[in-house]
Amino acid sequence: MATQKFASELQSLITVNVAGMGNLGVFDKRAGGETMAKPALYRPGGMGPQVAVPALPTFQDLTISKGFDLNKDIPIIAKLMQLSGRANVTVTEQMLDSDGNAFGTPRVWNGILADVNPGIGDGESEVTRIWDITVIATTVSN
């Protein structure tokens, strides 16, 4: 295993599993999925010091994307569009070392499929078509 101090963004293996469809394979990018909380502030009477009251975290939406594969993505996207708003989704991101080997424990988000974007159609573009899904995350673990 290679030793390195910092990881680059490309050192991750992102997979998506959708209920009713199974493993959709490896995706190129993951954005979102951060946790956030809004602890309440409380100041007791008598000019007491301000206190932060703990709060539960919420999770930001995830957008998972990949290049459009003409040989297999058309029926996958069609089925995902039918399942939008209802299907349970698991997104797994496994960090990789500089040799492409699994490193550490994968992070796993569970949620509901919200949006399906089949990619942009542009007759004047030479850019690779990218399609993506948005997942409303309900849990995250690692």
Image: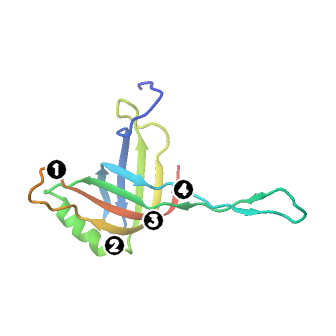
> Mark 3 packing: few (<14 Cα in 10 Å), some, or many (20+)?
many
Q: Which residue is mark 1?
A: 127
Foreground label between 1 and 4: 1
Closer to the eye: label 1 or 3: 1
Q: Which residue is mark 2?
A: 84
* Badge 2 or badge 3: first in the primary sequence: 2
Q: Nearer the viewer, residue 51 or 14?
A: 51
Q: Amino acid at mark 2?
A: Ser
Amino acid marked by disc 3: Gly
Tell me the element at label 3.
Answer: strand
Which structural element holds mark 1? loop
Name the residue beneath numbered marker 4: 35
Front tag of 4 and 2:
4
Which x, y percent locates residue 56? Answer: 64, 62
Under mark 4, the amino acid is: Thr
- Give the structural element (helix, strand or loop) at label 4: strand
Residue drawn 37% across the image and 38% down it: 11
Model colouring:
rainbow
**Crowd tier of the residue under label 4, counting other residues whose Cα lies within 10 Å: few below 14, some 14–19, many 20 or above:** some
Q: Quadrant of the N terminus?
A: top left
Mark 1 in CB contact with mark 3 (< 8 angstroms):
no
**Front-lying residue, 71 or 116:** 116
* Nearer-N-terminus badge (4/2): 4
Mark 3, residue position: 111
Q: Position of residue 67 (x, y in %)?
A: 22, 52
Residue at 41%, 48% in the rendered image: 93
Q: Amino acid at mark 1?
A: Val
Q: In the rendered view, would you say 100 is above or below 39?
A: above
Would residue 57 appear left or right of 134 to someone viewing this image? right
Q: Extreme left residue here? A: 123
Select label 3 or label 4 by which is in front.
4
